[in-house]
Every structure is written in C-alpha cells, then in structure tokens.
Image (tube, rainbow, N blue to C red):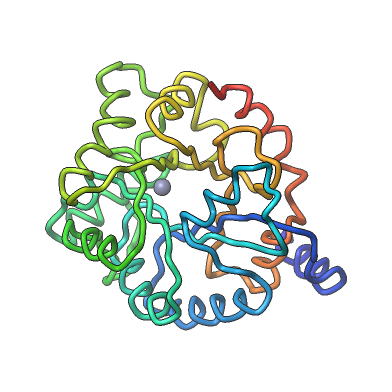
Amino acid sequence: MKNLILKILYSVIGEINSNQLRVIIFHNIENNQEEKFEKLIKKLKETWNIITPSEFKDLTVNNNINIKKKNILITFDDGYKSQKIITEKYLDPLNIKALFFIVSDFIKLKTKNEAHNFIRKNFYKEERSELILDENTLNMSQEDIQELISNGHSIGGHTGTHAELSKIKNNNMFLDEIINSSLRLENIIQNYKIEDFAYTFGDLESIDEKSTKAILKNYKYLYSGLRGNNLNLNSKIIRRDAISLTEPFEVISAYLNGYTDFIYKTKIKKLEKWKL
Ligand SMILES: [Zn+2]
C-alpha cells in the first residue's frame, strides 16, 4: 500500500529540483539484484551528483553554501561480500567512491555457516534462526576491506556484533561495541583513522542519549537511518535513506526526493538534542 502511494505520488510530482545533500544506504545485494543495482546507479547519475565521502563532509560545513543541486553519497552497511563485488563491477569503472560501515566481528568469520548464523543472530532485532539465506551471502574478509581502502573507498564503524546500543547494560560491552570495534578495524589496515560511525538498525529506538554522546565523543560523524536532507545540519548527526532493491525505482526515487521526510522530522530533532 505504502509503495503504491509513493509510486503514484512520484508519477505526479516527479523529481524535486531544490538543493539536496543526501545519503543512501544499501545492505546485502543478492546475485539476482545486481542488474537492478547497475540500473539504479545509472538512473541516479542522470539526476544526482554522486559525491565522495570527503566531498560529502566538505558540503556539511560552512552552512552548506557550496551545495548546488542534488548531491548523494553512497553507503553500505554491515560488511557483506556482495558489496565489494558490486563495487568492483559497477562503481569502480565509474570512479564512484563509497563509504562502508563494517561490523568488526562479522569480517573475521571464515565459513559460510558462521556468516549465516551471525546474520540470523545479530542483524535483526529478534533472532531469526529459521531465516533462509541466499547461498552466495557471505561476509567480507579483512583483505577485502584493505582492497576497498586501496581503491579509494572509505570505511566506518558499525559496532562489533551489531548490538542494539540503547539496550546494552554492561559498561565494558558498551565501550567494546562503540570504541574497541573500530580500533580492531584500524588494526587490520595500515595508516587509517576511522572518523565515521553508523549506529545499528538506524531507528530512534535503537539509540539513546548515552550512546549518542559516546559516539560523538569518539567519532567526527554519526550516521543514522532517519531519512532527510542534510542541508543546514546543526550537528554531526547524518540523515540517511535506507532503500531496498526489491522496491520499484519510483519508490526509491520518492524517498530520495524527500517525499517522506516529514515523518522523520520529530525523531531527528530528538536525536539532535543529544548532540554534545
Ligand atoms: Zn547494520
């Protein structure tokens, strides 16, 4: 129903031409979605300026005076192998640079079985032990991360075990998920300082004041899953649009053109109240 409404709205309203600074989130990309991914990138390039992580950061300072037209940064969450494969296939030839948020324990796994069990146990709010995963679903390896960096991409922290930060009671665990997880990532890469952190699940219920403050103390930027334009930011808390490749292109476009941003305004305000 929601998709149908957005589809109709997009056919009526279409692209919105005001200045925009947005961030898109991808998760796992299954084999049969590769073609859709390629098409989406090509379509985006028609109306959006796809920017690098450092261009994105430059545009968030100076009160956004330099923002002209529609700019978008591509991010990938969790550290799936498929993300590296499609990056090499479709982004690298177009010289597009992306930001990858990595779950540090996930990339240490050596077998498909371990990866699938980790996904079932940790990547959903409730464990999904019965979930059937595509045969090709795997985690990236440490070498994959190193290669992404060598090819000009960036990485950020996304906890150690994909824990829901607002639910952690134990202080050592809390620090391990927020700080040590990224130190472990830095240890496998030469001369790389992580300054970005995406909190898990992305909704307002998954984060609280304590974790927001701890993240902003240890990182330059905190990435949420709350939708919105990053024009006129008054904090280092970034709005992002999660999309699924199972959604029609018109629905994805409706999100990226901000049709549903109004739903997230109050939540963003609440999150920003916790800034340092
Ligand atoms: Zn995640």
The answer to whether residue 228 of the structure is visible from this angle is: no
Residue farthest to the right? 12
Q: At 69% across and 67% down in the image, what residue appears?
A: 253
Residue 158 rendering spot, x and y as whole percentages: 36, 42
Residue 103 rendering spot, x and y as whole percentages: 30, 46
Q: At 21% across and 52% down in the image, what residue appears?
A: 107
Between 33 and 177, which is closer to the camera in this rendering?
A: 177
Between 212 and 131, which is closer to the camera in this rendering?
A: 212
Q: At 55% across and 31% down in the image, what residue appears?
A: 205
Q: At 67% across and 54% down in the image, what residue appears?
A: 66
In the image, taking residue 20 as reference, residue 37 lies left or right, namely left
The answer to whether residue 43 of the structure is visible from this angle is: yes
Between 213 and 236, which is closer to the camera in this rendering?
A: 236
Q: Is residue 38 above or below residue 262?
A: below
Q: Is residue 204 above or below residue 142?
A: above
Residue farthest to the left? 110
Q: Is residue 53 above or below residue 275?
A: below
In the image, taking residue 246 as reference, residue 48 lies left or right, namely right
Q: Where the N terminus falls, by quadrant?
A: bottom right
Quarter occupied by residue 94: bottom left
Between 157 and 58, which is closer to the camera in this rendering?
A: 58
Residue 61 rendering spot, x and y as whole percentages: 60, 43
Residue 275 rendering spot, x and y as whole percentages: 56, 24
In the image, taking residue 100 as reference, residue 109 lies left or right, namely left
Q: Please give the count of numbered marks on the rendered protein.
A: 0
In the image, taking residue 67 as reference, residue 57 lies left or right, namely left
